């Protein structure tokens, strides 16, 4: 089919449009729709279509055939042997058939179209022929060599587009599968965490209660060792879970006011006992330019700082460990600024060829490190990810035999004040609890954890009742007044979330304050508890100080003081 200059220019314009539409195609179906819309106009044909070999079959193909200019219509089954489709696939070349006999080339459902000319060009994925791009006409001798060359070029364009969208689709499927695997891993680890944390809560809780009894020196040494081992096991579990949540992108940062100097002081206190045992000097310096109060995730900032301090103390035999805090450059605006923390030690240092391993998960500077000093090899990997989540970074400067300095930067916002809750709501609460007869209901199905929570609270002056599930908690509330409920989330009969919803619906504003007490670990657990109507959240294993602090947070000082006031006789 010989085309004049105007026809050639028009074809080139249509080809340019077709190429653009192919590049924008999001899926395979859209590629076929583009071919159906443009092929008849570009090739001057009556129909256009694509055909693919049926997987595992040598005698059939699936044909998508365009009987109208703008749509791929029906799927038809094409019998392959003896057709130009078979010749194209076998020879891997464009084939023109200008004398189609009635009943040949097309399936019975399309033979009424009276096609007399048909041309197939191979579609390829890589080097493999996967089907054909074809045009057809009701006119005999409709196609010539120029048409065959043009169709070959268009087939190459369509082949490349099909390969692109299939690759993209495979990538999306692979990503979805990976995300599903990551979710499954996180859910499994969360379940495993619950199973580990529940007995750990009993072990650490009972040991802490035992430490408060009268013990001789030998017994105290044994108990202290057992508790230290339990705390070490809990640290390992937390590391694995934190890293898993970060990998699954399930870490959600908090935005709360905190006092920078208090954060540094508290972090130093955590490692001070170990530093004293080693004869190390601890020092801290917060630059005067650093605001007193900031807003951000203080828990995660402290997690990074404590990890670096713990490593510094662990790997330093003599000398000092020093923390400095300053602003990193000028503030981005009136509110956002970068805090730079430096943790410097006079320890053994790290060989230059080992530095690149530091921030890799499950890796340590030397293979012997785990044997000599213990640890999961996750602390620095977690710290690095947390810094990045908070808009910052972490780096290390080290000299073998002289020491190491870790520097990390996190982005926070200025705050006018820190936590406004009065300190006495926690520090004075145990003494006030006994006088005010503050009643706590513990809803927990594990007998050991029931006993632990009960004893911890009784020792802090609270009146305590214990139930084993949500239904029993509802029944207890019908019998007497409670100020606070410590509610386990996973319980038989009726879980803590549903029990909380029923309590909110039944008692409204007159209900007790409800604190979730759970060993669950996934991001979103806190949100689920708050959405159900709970007022606060405590992770297991919980120390007595954690429980008292949580109760202090949910009970306003005014409510406690009101409970302490002597009752006024009626009529006075």
Image: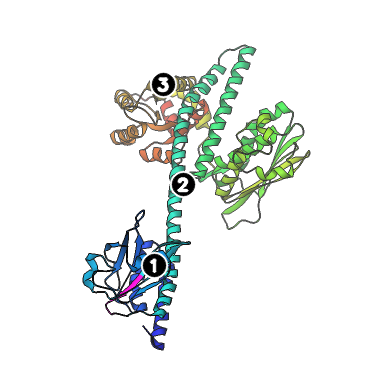
Residue on which the image places disc 1: 88
Question: Which of the pair 273/260 is nearer the observer?
Answer: 273
Q: Mark yes or no: residue 341 visible.
A: no
- Magenta residue span: 134-141
Mark 3 vs mark 1: which is more N-terminal?
Answer: 1
Which residue extends farthest bottom?
5
Cα gap from disc 2 to disc 3, whole angstroms: 47 Å
Q: Point out residue 352 in the picture as x, y percentages from the top left corner.
A: 73, 45
Whether residue 278 sits left or right of residue 57 in the image: it is: right
Q: Which image quadrant for residue 316?
A: top right
Residue 108 figure quarter: bottom left
**From the image, which quarter does the C terminus lie in?**
top left
Q: Specify which label sits upstream in the sequence, 1 or 2.
A: 1
Q: Element under label 3?
A: strand
User: How many numbered discs sit on the rendered protein?
Assistant: 3
Residue sticking out furthest to the left: 112
Magenta-drawn stretch contains 139: yes
Q: Horizontal and vertical percent for residue 341?
A: 66, 45
The verdict on residue 446 being magenta is no
Pointer 2 residue: 178
Callout 1: SS: helix
Q: In the rendered image, is residue 201 in sight?
A: yes
Pinpoint residue 289: horizontal percent, then vertical percent.
66, 50
């Amino acid at each position: 089919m010989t085309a004049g200059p105007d026809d050639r220019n028009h074809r080139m314009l249509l080809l340019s449009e077709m190429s653009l539409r192919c590049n924008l195609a999001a899926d395979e179906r859209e590629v076929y729709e583009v071919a159906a819309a443009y092929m008849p106009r570009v090739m001057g044909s009556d129909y256009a279509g694509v055909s693919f070999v049926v997987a595992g079959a040598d005698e059939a193909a699936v044909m998508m055939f365009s009987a109208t200019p703008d749509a791929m219509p029906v799927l038809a089954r094409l019998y392959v042997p003896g057709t130009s489709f078979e010749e194209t696939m076998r020879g891997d070349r464009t084939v023109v058939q200008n004398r189609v006999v009635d009943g040949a080339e097309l399936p019975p459902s399309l033979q009424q179209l009276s096609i007399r000319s048909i041309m197939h060009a191979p579609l390829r994925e890589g080097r493999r022929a996967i089907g054909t791009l074809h045009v057809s006409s009701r006119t005999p001798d409709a196609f010539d060599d120029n048409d065959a060359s043009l169709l070959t070029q268009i087939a190459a364009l369509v082949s490349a587009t099909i390969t692109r969208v299939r690759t993209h689709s495979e990538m999306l499927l692979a990503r979805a599968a990976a995300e599903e695997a990551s979710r499954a891993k996180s859910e499994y680890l969360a379940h495993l965490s619950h199973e580990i944390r529940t007995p750990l809560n009993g072990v650490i809780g009972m040991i802490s209660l035992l430490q408060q009894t009268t013990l001789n020196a030998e017994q105290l040494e044994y108990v202290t060792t057992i508790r230290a081992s339990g705390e070490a096991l809990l640290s390992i579990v937390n590391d694995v879970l934190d890293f898993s949540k970060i990998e699954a992108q399930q870490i959600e940062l908090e935005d709360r006011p905190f006092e920078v100097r208090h954060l540094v002081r508290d972090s130093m206190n955590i490692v001070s006992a170990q530093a004293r045992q080693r004869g190390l000097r601890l020092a801290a310096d917060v630059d005067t330019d650093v605001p007193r109060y900031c807003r951000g995730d203080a828990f995660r900032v402290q997690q990074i700082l404590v990890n670096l301090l713990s490593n510094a103390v662990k790997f330093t035999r003599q000398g000092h460990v020093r923390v400095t805090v300053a602003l990193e450059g000028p503030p981005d605006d009136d509110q956002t600024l970068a805090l730079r923390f430096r943790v410097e030690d006079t320890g053994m240092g790290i060989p230059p060829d080992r530095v690149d391993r530091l921030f890799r998960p499950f890796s340590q500077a030397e293979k012997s490190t785990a044997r000599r000093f213990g640890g999961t090899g996750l602390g620095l990997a977690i710290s690095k990810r947390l810094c990045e989540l908070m808009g910052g970074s972490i780096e290390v400067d080290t000299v073998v035999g002289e020491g190491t300095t870790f520097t990390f930067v996190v982005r926070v916002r200025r705050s006018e004040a820190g936590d406004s809750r009065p300190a006495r709501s926690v520090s004075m609460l145990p003494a006030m609890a006994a006088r005010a007869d503050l009643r706590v209901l513990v809803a927990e199905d594990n007998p050991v954890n029931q006993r632990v929570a009960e004893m911890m609270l009784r020792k802090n002056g609270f009146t305590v009742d214990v139930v084993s599930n949500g239904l029993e908690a509802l029944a207890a509330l019908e019998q007497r007044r409670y100020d606070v409920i410590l509610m386990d989330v996973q319980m038989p009969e009726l879980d803590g979330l549903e029990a909380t919803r029923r309590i909110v619906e039944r008692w409204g504003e007159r209900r007790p304050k409800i604190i979730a007490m759970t060993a669950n670990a996934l991001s979103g657990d806190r949100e689920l508890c708050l959405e159900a109507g709970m007022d606060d959240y405590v992770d297991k294993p919980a120390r007595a100080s954690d429980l008292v602090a949580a109760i202090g947070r949910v009970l306003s000082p005014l409510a406690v003081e009101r409970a302490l006031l002597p009752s006024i006789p009626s009529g006075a």
